[in-house]
Structures are given as structure tokens and as C-alpha cells.
């Protein structure tokens, strides 16, 4: 049994001392998550740090020596000043002599391992496996400690006797609950929900022999099973797999209850609603095939009910086609999704006393799908119709949600068309609407769409040359997205975070900070790769491919030509297969990237022009497509066309002008030669 769980070894310098004090407080005040405490584990009960400067000597005081001998783990705060401290080196050496080298944990606050590790620590073979890196630009202690909250889990898990992954998972769940002001623990919420579910089924069983109460009771239970349980859990982090299980189990319970009720139509309607909710949960989890099966079952039930004259099912069937279109879009089946959106909109318009808000939502969903198809005119038409309808409604939470979403999608369309001023205005309006929404209803879903909108606004500001403003938006959005993305089962949160990393990389690339851009691209590729590995869908494969291609383009500008070509080859191989099934937009993007590879690496200017021309024919209004077509023209001898197109693109914003300047500079430095006719 040790007297201390952790000993902090550090150099007595202002930054080192400040960070050590904060780490000491963090360690002693950290409360191990309840599930681990219940297993008998404990965190840091007692920590040691010396507050007095020791004499320059390799002889440790009795107090220090005794503390080292009775300490479980040694945390060494490493900075550029650390190697010159003989007593820090001696403390590490003592731990090694005690046979506890595997309990030495370096925490890096400045410099790098070569310049900041004491000599003795470099002798530990696997010490880098336990490295905790909390370096921050400008030695910002607030940011450093924000990183330390997660990094210190390496030490705490070692003390507790659990794996770091296990502690990190429980820590993130607890952190999310606190951040999202859940109040009661999610464990208690789950127990409550399960208790309610059990109670409901017991009530159903009790009513089985009670003829007079059977009808009303059965329908109440159906309604509670379908709506109550999943809706209570839907805003709890990491709950979608549980929601899916509950809804899946409901299908059996509902069938049992249907046998108890004489109102078969109402019961079948509730069963259809349950299948719809099940489809939504499966889609969130990346289970598109299962989601389509569930939604098809719901549509079949609803259409049969509508055909028999059950009025409520007519609106339900329209909703079913809209929901199936959402799933098809997630799977990259845009043409099929478009057909379902058309059917849903037509059915919704035909309803007596149809809900205008639902119609507006269907219209902006169809518009988003049209963007993915590369049909900008259709997308704009859908968005205008949706906004026209929404603008006449009172600004309730539901209307604000719809307004923010449609303006976000419209902003994406304007941004992709290079209309940055219009896109900035549209996205700013969306942020304002979504801010108002969050004041009324601060939910995970509402935060998510707000973060996505801020991300797109930051990308727009970057291309317009407003870098400082964009950086502020990116920082806030990434911090918020990283919290939501701790819910690793929610694919939409992972996609949002990956897109943010990718867009932040683009921002640094435009500004010429290729090292910073490379780091964000690497983060994006890592997340996108995990998403594609889990879902296997073509849209996620395309997103992963683009992150690889962005890394290759960035490496080219940084003169890392061999590395650049490797990323281009890998990215194009991934994108080719996905683009073939995804339609016009992605095929144009793939051809554009292939053309650029043929231009800068193969130096096959004629083939590059063929690919660029094919892309331009498919998607003539897209900025990236136009820019690359201009480069292909330039090196194929059509300088007049190239100059005209590049001037047009550069006039849209300072960011685009800077992109073109850096692209041409990188091409020149790589030895590309402009051909004259």
C-alpha cells in the first residue's frame, strides 16, 4: 500500500510551477465515475509535490526520497527547462532503480521529448506510450489544462486499475451529462425508463382480464411505448443504441397488445410510428440497410391504412416517404431519394388541412438532396418555396428549427456557387435563428445544426479573406463539436466534427500555414476513415477520399511531392468507386481532382484538360471545378480562357484570390511550364 498515489516532479520555474499546481489540484479533485467506484476502484486519494526549490545536487532530501519510495506513479512535468534540473533527473532515476519505470508518466508542456525529457527518462523504452501532451500555442494555461483533463486520465486509469479506454468512456459520458446540464445521471435516467417500461407491461398484463378497461389501457400503453420511452432518451448522449433496442423490442410488445384491442386500425398506426422511429434510430447509428427495412414496413402499414380510409394514415404515409428519402440520401442513393421527396411533397399538398410546416420541411429536405445531385436550380427553387412558407408563420421553436435548417442548406448552395457575400448573409441569418431556437430549446440536435452552420459560415469567411473572424468561429465550433462527438455511436456528430477539421485545414491551407493544415486534415481523415469503416456507405467513402486528396494538395504546396502523390493516388482510388454511384456532383468533383493529379504529378496536360472539361460540363457553376478547369487551360496553351476564368473567381473574394496565387506559386516551384499555342 502506497502513501501517495502520484508524485509530481517538476522544475521550479513560473510556468512549470503554475501547471504543476493545477495538475495537483486536478488529480486530487478528480472524482472517478460511479460505475468504476462501484467496482471497488479509486482515483487519486493523495498526491505529492515539493513546493520548495531543492539545492543543485543529486542528493535528494529525506522527505523527497521517502515520498518517492512510497508513491505509486511518478508524473514528470517536462519543459525546455527540465533537462537542466539534476534533481528532476534524479527523481526519475530513483523510480527506475525502484523497478517502477513502467509507472513513470511524462507530461509535456513545452518543447518536445528530445529537448524537454530529463536524461534518465530517455532510458525508459516505452515511456512514449504514456506521454501526455498538453502543449498550447503561446503557453496558454487555460488551453493546456483543458487538454490535461483528458490526458491525465492515463495516470488516473493506472492508479484505478482499469484501462484508459474504459475510464475515458465513462469520463466522457459523465462530462457530457454535466456539459448538457442533465442534472440526474444518465444511469438513473435509464433505470427510470426501464422501470417505466416494465411497469407499463405489468399494467398491460393486469388489464388482460379486465374487459372494461382493456381497450383504453392498451391504447395508452401503445402510445407510451411508441412515443414516451424513445423520446425521453433521444437527447441523452450515447443512448441511440438503447433507443434502437427499446424500439426493436416494442415491435413484439405492440403485436401482443394489438391482440388485446378491438381498435385494430389505431393499433396498427401506432405500430407504423414505432417502425418509423426505429428507422430513424438505425439511420443515426449508420445502419442504413436496417433503417430502410424498418421504414418500408412502416410505409406498407400506413398505405394499407390510408387505403382503407383511416385519415390519420394519409399524413403518416407522406411522412413515411419523406423519412425514407432521408435514409436513401444518407446512403448516397440521391435519385431514389429525390423520387421519394417528390412523392412526399405531392401527398402532403393533397391533404385536407395539411400542415404547412411539415410541407416546408419536406421542401428543404428535397433541396438538400438536389444539392447532392448537383442540381442547383432545383435546390434553389425548393429553398425559396420553403422560406416563403416559413416566413408567414409565428417564430415558434419548430419554425425556428426549420428556418435555421433551410437557410443553412441554402447557404451551402450559395457557397458552392462562389457567391460568398450572399452565402455569408444567409448563414448569418441561420445562426441568428438557431441561437433563438437554442434559447427556447437547448437540445443536442439544435446544438448540432448550429455548429454545422457556424462551420459553413467560417468556411465562407475564409474564402472571402476574413481569416481572423473565421478562426474565431472555427475555434468555438470545434470545441462544441468535440464535446458532442464524444457520443461515438452518433454518426452525424462524427461527420460534423470531421467536416470541421477538414474545413479548418482548408482555412490554414489558404493562408499558407501548411503544417497546421496538415494536422487538421490528418484529424479529419482519421474520423472520416472510422465513419466509413463503420457505415460502408458511398457518401462517407467520398468524404474520406476528399480528406485524403486535400492532404495531398497541401503536401504539394509544402514541396512534399512524393507524399503528395501517395495521398492523391489513395484518395482517387477511394473516390472513383464512390463517385460512380453518387451522381453528377461527386463525379464532377472526382474528375476535377483527377485532372489536378494529372496536371501536377503526371504533367500530362492534354489528359488533364480532358478530365477538367468533363467535370466543367457536368458542374459549370462550382468554384473548385472552374478553378481547376482554368489551370488545365493555362498549361494546355489556352491562356486567354484561363485568365478570364481565374479573374472571375478571384473577384468573388480575397480568399479565392489568395488560393489562386498560392496554387500558381506552388505549380511554378514544382517546375510546371505554361504551354503557349
Image: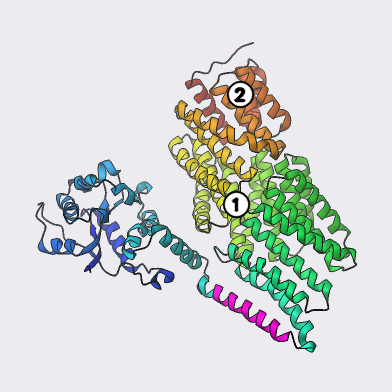
Magenta span main SS: helix
Provide residue 366's location: percent of width, then percent of height. 76, 49
Q: Which residue is mark 2?
A: 631
Answer whether residue 135 is visible to the viewer in this image.
yes
Determine the image quadrant of residue 621. Answer: top right
Residue segment shown in magenta? 190-209
Name the spot of residue 372 as percent of width and height, x first: 70, 43
* Residue 478: % across, % down: 51, 52
Q: In this rendering, is residue 36 above or below 107?
A: below
Q: Is residue 47 left or right of residue 259?
A: left
Task: Verify whether residue 278 appears in magenta.
Answer: no
Q: Nearer the viewer, residue 168 or 459?
A: 168
Q: Is residue 193 magenta?
A: yes
Question: Quadrant location of residue 255?
Answer: bottom right
Q: Which mark is residue 50?
A: none
Q: Give 397 or 491, whichever is nearer the viewer.
A: 491
Q: Is residue 326 left or right of residue 50?
A: right
Judge whether 530 appears above or below 293 on screen: above
N-terminal label among 1 and 2: 1
- Within 10 Å of disc 2 (Cα), the crowding (few <14, some 14-19, many 20+) is many
Q: Nearer the viewer, residue 433 or 243?
A: 243
Is residue 391 visible in the rendered structure shown here? Answer: no
Q: Residue, x 58% and y 23% (percent of image)? A: 598
SS for tag 2?
A: helix
Q: Which residue is mark 1?
A: 452
Amino acid at each position: 500500500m502506497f502513501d501517495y498515489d502520484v508524485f509530481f516532479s517538476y522544475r521550479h520555474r513560473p510556468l512549470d510551477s503554475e501547471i504543476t499546481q493545477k495538475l495537483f489540484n486536478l488529480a486530487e479533485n478528480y472524482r472517478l465515475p460511479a460505475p468504476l467506484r462501484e467496482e471497488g476502484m479509486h482515483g487519486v486519494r493523495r498526491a505529492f509535490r515539493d513546493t520548495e526549490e531543492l539545492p543543485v545536487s543529486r542528493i535528494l532530501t529525506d522527505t523527497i526520497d521517502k515520498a518517492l519510495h512510497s508513491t505509486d506513479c511518478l508524473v514528470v512535468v517536462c519543459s525546455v527547462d527540465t533537462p537542466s534540473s539534476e534533481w528532476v533527473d534524479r527523481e526519475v532515476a530513483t523510480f527506475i532503480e525502484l523497478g517502477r519505470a513502467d509507472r513513470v508518466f511524462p507530461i509535456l508542456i513545452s518543447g518536445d521529448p528530445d529537448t524537454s525529457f530529463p536524461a534518465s527518462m530517455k532510458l525508459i523504452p516505452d515511456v512514449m506510450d504514456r506521454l501526455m501532451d498538453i502543449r498550447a500555442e503561446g503557453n496558454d494555461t487555460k488551453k493546456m489544462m483543458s487538454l490535461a483533463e483528458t490526458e491525465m486520465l492515463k495516470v488516473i486509469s493506472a492508479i484505478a486499475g482499469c484501462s484508459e479506454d474504459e475510464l475515458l468512456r465513462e469520463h466522457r459520458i459523465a462530462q457530457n451529462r454535466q456539459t448538457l446540464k442533465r442534472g440526474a445521471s444518465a444511469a438513473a435516467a435509464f433505470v427510470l425508463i426501464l422501470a417505466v417500461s416494465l411497469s407499463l407491461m405489468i399494467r398491460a398484463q393486469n388489464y388482460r382480464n379486465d374487459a372494461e378497461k382493456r381497450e383504453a389501457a392498451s391504447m395508452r400503453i401503445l402510445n407510451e411505448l411508441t412515443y414516451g420511452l424513445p423520446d425521453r432518451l433521444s437527447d441523452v448522449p450515447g443512448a441511440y443504441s438503447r433507443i434502437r433496442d427499446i424500439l426493436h423490442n416494442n415491435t413484439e410488445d405492440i403485436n401482443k397488445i394489438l391482440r388485446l384491442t378491438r381498435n385494430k386500425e389505431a393499433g396498427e398506426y401506432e405500430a407504423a410510428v414505432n417502425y418509423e422511429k426505429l428507422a430513424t434510430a438505425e439511420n443515426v447509428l449508420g445502419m442504413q440497410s436496417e433503417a430502410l427495412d424498418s421504414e418500408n414496413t412502416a410505409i406498407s402499414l400506413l398505405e394499407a391504412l390510408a387505403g382503407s380510409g383511416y385519415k390519420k394514415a394519409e399524413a403518416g404515409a407522406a411522412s413515411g416517404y419523406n423519412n425514407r428519402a432521408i435514409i436513401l440520401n444518407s446512403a448516397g442513393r440521391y435519385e431514389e431519394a429525390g423520387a421519394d421527396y417528390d412523392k412526399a411533397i405531392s401527398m402532403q399538398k393533397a391533404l385536407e388541412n395539411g400542415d404547412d410546416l411539415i410541407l416546408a420541411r419536406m421542401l428543404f429536405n428535397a433541396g438538400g438532396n438536389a444539392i447532392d445531385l448537383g442540381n442547383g436550380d432545383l435546390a434553389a427553387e425548393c429553398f425559396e418555396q420553403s422560406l416563403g412558407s416559413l416566413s408567414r408563420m409565428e417564430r415558434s421553436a419548430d419554425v425556428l428549427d426549420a428556418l435555421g435548417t433551410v437557410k443553412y442548406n441554402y447557404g451551402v448552395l450559395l457557397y458552392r456557387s462562389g457567391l460568398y457575400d450572399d452565402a455569408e448573409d444567409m448563414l448569418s441569418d441561420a445562426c441568428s435563428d438557431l441561437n433563438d431556437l437554442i434559447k427556447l430549446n437547448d437540445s443536442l440536435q439544435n446544438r448540432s445544426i448550429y455548429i454545422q452552420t457556424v462551420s459553413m459560415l467560417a468556411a465562407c469567411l475564409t474564402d472571402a479573406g476574413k481569416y481572423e473572424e473565421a478562426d474565431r468561429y472555427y475555434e468555438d465550433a470545434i470545441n462544441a463539436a468535440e464535446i458532442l462527438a464524444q457520443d461515438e455511436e452518433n454518426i452525424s456528430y462524427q461527420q460534423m466534427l470531421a467536416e470541421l477539421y477538414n474545413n479548418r485545414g482548408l482555412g490554414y491551407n489558404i493562408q499558407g500555414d501548411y503544417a497546421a493544415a496538415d494536422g487538421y486534415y490528418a484529424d479529419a481523415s482519421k474520423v472520416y476513415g472510422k465513419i466509413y469503416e463503420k457505415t460502408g456507405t458511398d457518401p462517407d467513402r467520398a468524404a474520406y477520399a476528399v480528406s485524403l486528396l486535400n492532404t495531398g494538395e497541401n503536401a504539394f504546396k509544402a514541396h512534399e511531392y512524393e507524399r503528395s502523390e501517395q495521398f492523391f493516388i489513395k484518395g482517387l482510388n477511394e473516390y472513383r468507386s464512390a463517385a460512380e454511384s453518387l451522381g453528377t456532383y461527386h463525379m464532377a468533383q472526382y474528375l476535377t481532382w483527377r485532372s489536378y493529379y494529372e496536371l501536377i504529378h503526371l504533367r500530362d496536360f492534354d489528359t488533364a484538360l480532358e478530365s477538367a472539361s468533363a467535370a466543367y460540363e457536368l458542374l459549370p457553376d462550382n468554384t473548385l471545378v472552374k478553378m481547376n478547369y482554368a489551370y488545365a487551360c493555362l498549361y494546355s496553351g489556352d491562356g486567354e480562357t484561363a485568365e478570364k476564368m481565374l479573374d472571375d473567381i478571384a473577384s468573388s473574394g480575397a480568399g479565392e484570390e489568395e488560393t489562386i496565387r498560392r496554387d500558381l506559386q506552388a505549380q511554378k516551384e514544382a517546375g510546371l511550364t505554361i504551354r503557349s499555342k
